[in-house]
Image (cartoon, coloured by chain):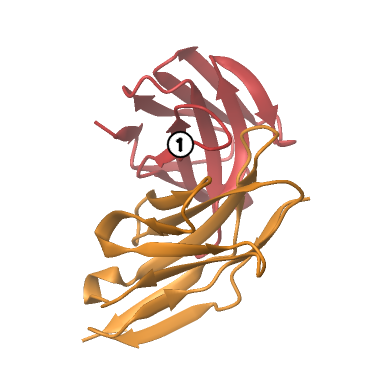
């Protein structure tokens, strides 16, 4: 069965500092990995995905993520965090063979202080 | 245009009422989804429609009834709900499955009294 773990419930950083949100996955088969962000009282917004190819994926709003197959990780990063990056972040995985299901992590709340 | 719209934004209903949630996308996506989300939790998949046919029902109680009238529209009919059904209901669509990202609507905040 596929699953995703986000080991940190909360991440707090100062504005201008690097931001990292951690994600590890467990699948049998090649994973398709996604990051979504949710602002209060809003739906989820797609940030980026890894399908195949370059392990460093660049996405929206200056975010990037690094796929590490040996560590089964897909950490989300931003070099310089903004107060407006404060939100709930979800990592998700779908297997390369199968249906339309995404397995979401529990979510990580990011707070960026001014 | 990567927008998924949902109406209404908020809905309060009694346990004996019948109501419907509506979702629309004009991206030509052939997969559409309903999710239920509780506060600070990840979305829980309820239903998936692929090419206007129901392909996944995650053992959702029959008081929730999905409908896909055409490739752009998705409805969720609600009847005899329970207070524990109060949640944010999210609609999403994608161009396909597996490798395709899902685009989410803003959700309908449902309160069952």
Element assignment for label 1: strand
Relative to B54, residue B35 above or below: below
- In the picture, measured across the screen, residue A55 lies left or right of residue B49, that is left
Disc 1 is attached to a residue of which chain? B
Residue A57: image quadrant is bottom left
Q: Residue at x 51, y 17 (%)?
A: B68
Of A70 and A26, the residue lying toward us = A70
Q: Residue at x 36, y 25 (%)?
A: B24
Whether residue B39 is visible here, answered yes or no, is no
Residue at the far top in the pictured view: B70
Q: Position of residue B39 (x, y in %)?
A: 50, 62
Residue holding disc 1: B91
- In the picture, measured across the screen, residue B90 lies left or right of residue A31, that is left
Of B25 and A70, the residue lying toward us = A70
Relative to B29, residue B47 above or below: below
Q: Which chain is orange?
A: A
The color chain B is rendered in:
red
Of B21 and A85, the residue lying toward us = A85
For label 1, count other residues whose C-alpha is less than 10 Å away and answer few (under 14), some (14-19) or many (20+). Answer: many
Q: How many marks?
A: 1
Q: Residue at x 44, y 14 (%)?
A: B71
Q: Position of residue B91 (x, y in %)?
A: 45, 36
């Amino acid at each position: 069965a596929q699953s995703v773990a986000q080991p940190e419930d909360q991440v707090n950083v100062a504005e201008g500092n690097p931001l990292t949100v951690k994600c590890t996955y467990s699948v049998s088969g090649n994973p398709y990995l996604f990051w979504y962000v949710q602002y209060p009282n809003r739906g989820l917004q797609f940030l980026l995905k890894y399908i195949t190819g370059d392990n460093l994926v660049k996405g929206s709003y200056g975010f990037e993520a690094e796929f590490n197959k040996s560590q089964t990780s897909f950490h989300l990063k931003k070099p310089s965090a903004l107060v407006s990056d404060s939100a709930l972040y979800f990592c998700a995985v779908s297997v390369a063979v199968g249906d339309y299901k995404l397995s979401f992590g529990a979510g990580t709340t990011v707070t960026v202080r001014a | 245009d990567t927008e998924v719209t949902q109406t209404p934004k908020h809905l309060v209903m009694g346990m004996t009422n019948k109501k419907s949630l509506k979702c629309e996308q004009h991206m030509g996506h052939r997969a559409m989804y309903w999710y239920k989300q509780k506060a600070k939790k990840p979305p829980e998949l309820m239903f998936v429609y692929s090419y206007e046919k129901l392909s996944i029902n995650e053992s959702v109680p029959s008081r929730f009834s999905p409908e896909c009238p055409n490739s752009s529209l998705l409805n969720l009919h609600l009847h005899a709900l329970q207070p524990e059904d109060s949640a944010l209901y999210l609609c999403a669509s994608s161009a396909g499955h597996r490798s395709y990202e899902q685009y989410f609507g803003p959700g309908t905040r449902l309160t069952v009294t």
